[in-house]
Amino acid sequence: MLDISAASDVASGSTRATREGPIDLVQLARMTLGDRGLEREVLQLFARQVAMLVDRMQGKPVATVAAVAHTLKGSARGVGAWRVAGAAEAVEHAAESAGAADLEDALRTIRTAADEVRATIAELLRAN
């Protein structure tokens, strides 16, 4: 079971937090200054945003897909969702190169990463 309190432990010097997994708890704690309430709020907002932005990419013109992926990449980096950020960057590059097969592969990958991070966030929020 994941523990959002691990992110807060970073602020107090504990080493329980990890960089592994869909959410980098060290980055999350750094971004929220170890405030557990803010961590929860940021995770809730990011879970909604990742779902909305991934849905927004489906069936849109490549320029729109690239712009939405760029936005998601920045948000994901902010909370330490490195897999989502990497997948968003791949979507952005595939959209810019206009390779339809590459873009479809990248969109499948980002959907998988988004589902994974949302499940992890739900687990983190339930645990606390």
Image (tube, grey):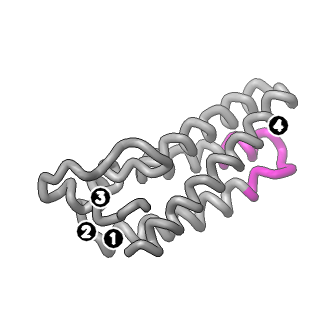
Count of number-bearing discs: 4
Q: Earlier in the sequence, mark 1 or mark 3?
A: 3
CB within 8 Å, label 2 to label 4 = no
Q: Earlier in the sequence, mark 2 or mark 4?
A: 2
Left or right: residue 13 compared with residue 95: left
The residue pinned by badge 3 equals 7
Toward the left, the furthest residue is 13
- Whether 91 is among the magenta residues is no
Q: Assign the C terminus to one quadrant of the image.
A: bottom left
The answer for how far apart the CA atoms under marks 2 and 4 are is 39 Å
Q: Residue 49 falls in which quadrant of the image?
A: bottom right
Q: Which mark is residue 35?
A: 2
Q: Amino acid at mark 2?
A: Asp
Query: Magenta part mainly helix, strand or loop?
Result: helix
Please report the residue visible at 83 percent of the width from the left and 26 percent of the height from the top.
Answer: 99
CB within 8 Å, label 4 to label 1 = no
Which residue range is magenta in the image?
A: 55-68
Q: Secondary structure at mark 1?
A: helix
